[in-house]
Amino acid sequence: MTNFQRAWIYQKERFPLLAHGPLIAAFSACAVSFSSLVRHAPVPGWAMYVTAFVVCLLMFLQLRIADEFKDAEDDARWRPYRPVPRGLVTLCELRLVFVFAAAVQIGLVLWLDPRLLWVLGIAWTYLTLMSMEFFCREWLKARPVVYLVSHMGIMPLVDFFGTACEWLPRAGKAPGGLGWFLAASFFNGVVIELGRKLRQPADEEEGVETYSALWGVRGGATMWLATMIATLACAIMAARGIGFTLPVACGLGAVLLVAFRAVFGYAHRGMSGKKIEIVSAVWTLALYLLLGLVPLFLKH
């Protein structure tokens, strides 16, 4: 099997570009656009969007690679079907990919504005602490909610980098009004994380930690919905800063109704947890389109 074939299989299983690419594109484009909108600035340049997208895409790839190292022992014991334990790729090869991704990120940052290095450095520092489980792995593992919150801290930091691709080259300092936007990003990260770890009892795997196993099917689904509502509240507050409150409230409200229906099917009719994960993706796409590209298009 060629290196290209192995890389293709790995990305398909662990970092599917066809699934993640559009979401990360919406995520990064929203960050750039929102920064422009909240500052009442001209339409951002294409270089800002390209830098934000590629750096964010590679950052999420680095998060996946960091997980491969962090979970290597558990994967070998409980999930031998994954690429690393079954020998499709090695940790050494993934380390090289991680370093190459970092080199690309640095190159893009220097191309757009060297001052972005410190913003990127903040996200990298947090990623490093995450990969080391903040030096308290066993303590965090015993507290799943704290573990979840601590690891979702990376989401607003990556989003902050995306906004910086617009405001730093143009204004040199962050605008007011980013707080609620970054809070929405944090809660949305929790929505995604919960959504991908909700399963029916028959689908649970030994050694695989899920929130449905932790809280039960109904409890996990309730927490997922509650986090969506928190995301909606933050998104509405962020939308006030760009004069787009009603469309955000109506658009996300419509997706929330779909989420309620999905929860009913999941909790009462045995629907697969995969449907919850799909709704999480739709929610994410709607959130970032409504807070970024849609208002930018309508206002310009």
Image (spheres, grey):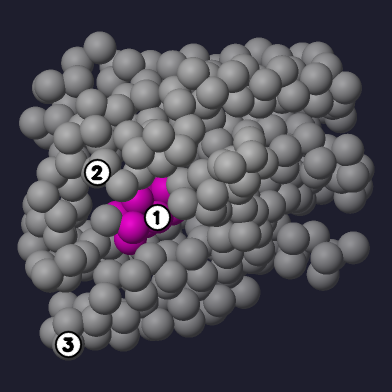
Q: Which label number is shown at residue 269?
A: 3
Q: Which label number is shown at residue 192?
A: 1
Circle 1 packing at 10 Å, graded few (<14), some (14-19), many (20+), is: many
Q: Residue at x 54, y 49 (%)?
A: 9
From the image, state whether disc 1 or disc 2 is nearer to you: 2
| Label 3–label 1 contact, CB within 8 A | no
- The quarter of the rendered structure image containing the N terminus is top right
Q: Sequence order check: which comes first, mark 3 or mark 1?
A: 1
Q: Is residue 103 left or right of residue 237?
A: right
Q: Which label number is shown at residue 79?
A: 2
The reply to whether the magenta stretch includes residue 135 is no
Asked if residue 16 can be seen in this view, the reply is yes
Q: Sequence order check: which comes first, mark 1 or mark 2?
A: 2
Q: Position of residue 256 (x, y in %)?
A: 40, 76
Circle 2 packing at 10 Å, graded few (<14), some (14-19), many (20+), is: some
Q: Position of residue 199 (x, y in %)?
A: 21, 65
Closest to the observer, 269 or 41: 269
Q: Amino acid at mark 3?
A: Arg
Bounds of the magenta span?
188-196
Secondary structure type for disc 2 = loop
Q: Which label number is shown at residue 59?
A: none
- The quarter of the rendered structure image containing the C terminus is bottom right
Tell me the chief SS of the magenta region: helix
Q: Amino acid at mark 1?
A: Ile
Quadrant of the image occupied by residue 152: top left
Q: Residue at x 72, y 50 (%)?
A: 29
Marks 3/2: CA distance? 28 Å
Asked if residue 241 can be seen in this view, the reply is no
